[in-house]
Image: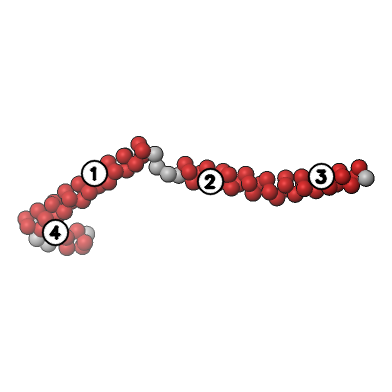
């Protein structure tokens, strides 16, 4: 009867170690990775700063293109033909 009790305890342990445990560990670290994927406050501030700079650059480029359009008509065609 002792062998039967040993097998009765051994089977659930083997199933747990081979199936449940790896899935559990995988899901744990996957959720940790997703939680770390969010931006920190410092990163969010830096991203907003970069976005502001990019918007200012777009405005400057638009202004420069408008100046070129008024002073040198057809400059775009010359760039495309080169």
Query: For the residue carrying disc 2, how many other residues have a C-alpha within 10 Å: few (<14), some (14-19), or many (20+)?
Result: few
Residue 52 placement: quadrant: top left
Q: At numbered mark 4, what does the secondary structure look like: helix, strand or loop?
A: helix
Asked if labels 2 and 3 touch by Cβ distance under 8 angstroms, the answer is: no
Q: Residue at x 59, y 47 (%)?
A: 27
Q: Position of residue 67 (x, y in %)?
A: 9, 53
Q: Residue placed farthest to the left in the image?
A: 71
Query: For the residue carrying disc 3, how many other residues have a C-alpha within 10 Å: few (<14), some (14-19), or many (20+)?
Result: few
Q: Which residue is mark 2?
A: 31
- In this view, the residue in front, 11 or 67, is 11
- In this view, the residue in front, 30 or 75, is 30
Left-right relation of 38 to 8: left
Label 3, label 4: how many angstroms apart (C-alpha)?
83 Å
Disc nearest the viewer among 1 and 3: 3
Disc nearest the viewer among 3 and 4: 3
Q: Residue at x 10, y 58 (%)?
A: 69
Asked if labels 4 and 1 touch by Cβ distance under 8 angstroms, the answer is: no
Q: Position of residue 68 (x, y in %)?
A: 11, 55
Q: Which of the two discs, 1 and 4, labels the residue nearer the N terminus?
A: 1
Q: Position of residue 59 (x, y in %)?
A: 17, 50
Q: Which residue is mark 4?
A: 75
Q: Which of the two discs, 3 and 2, labels the residue nearer the N terminus?
A: 3
Label 3, label 2: how many angstroms apart (C-alpha)?
31 Å
Label 2, label 4: how many angstroms apart (C-alpha)?
54 Å
Label 2, label 1: how many angstroms apart (C-alpha)?
34 Å
- In this view, the residue in front, 12 or 47, is 12
- Image quarter (top left, top right, bottom left or bottom right) of the C terminus: bottom left
Q: Which residue is mark 3?
A: 9
- Image quarter (top left, top right, bottom left or bottom right) of the N terminus: top right
Q: Residue placed farthest to the top in the image?
A: 42
Q: Residue at x 60, y 46 (%)?
A: 26
Q: Which of the two discs, 3 and 4, labels the residue nearer the N terminus?
A: 3
């Amino acid at each position: 009867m002792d062998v039967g009790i040993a097998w009765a305890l051994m089977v659930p342990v083997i199933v747990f170690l081979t199936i449940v445990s790896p899935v559990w560990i995988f899901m744990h670290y996957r959720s940790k990775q997703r939680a770390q994927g969010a931006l920190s406050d410092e990163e969010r501030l830096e991203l907003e700063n970069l976005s502001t700079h990019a918007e200012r650059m777009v405005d400057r480029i638009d202004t420069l293109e408008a100046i070129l359009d008024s002073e040198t008509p057809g400059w775009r065609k010359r760039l495309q033909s080169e």
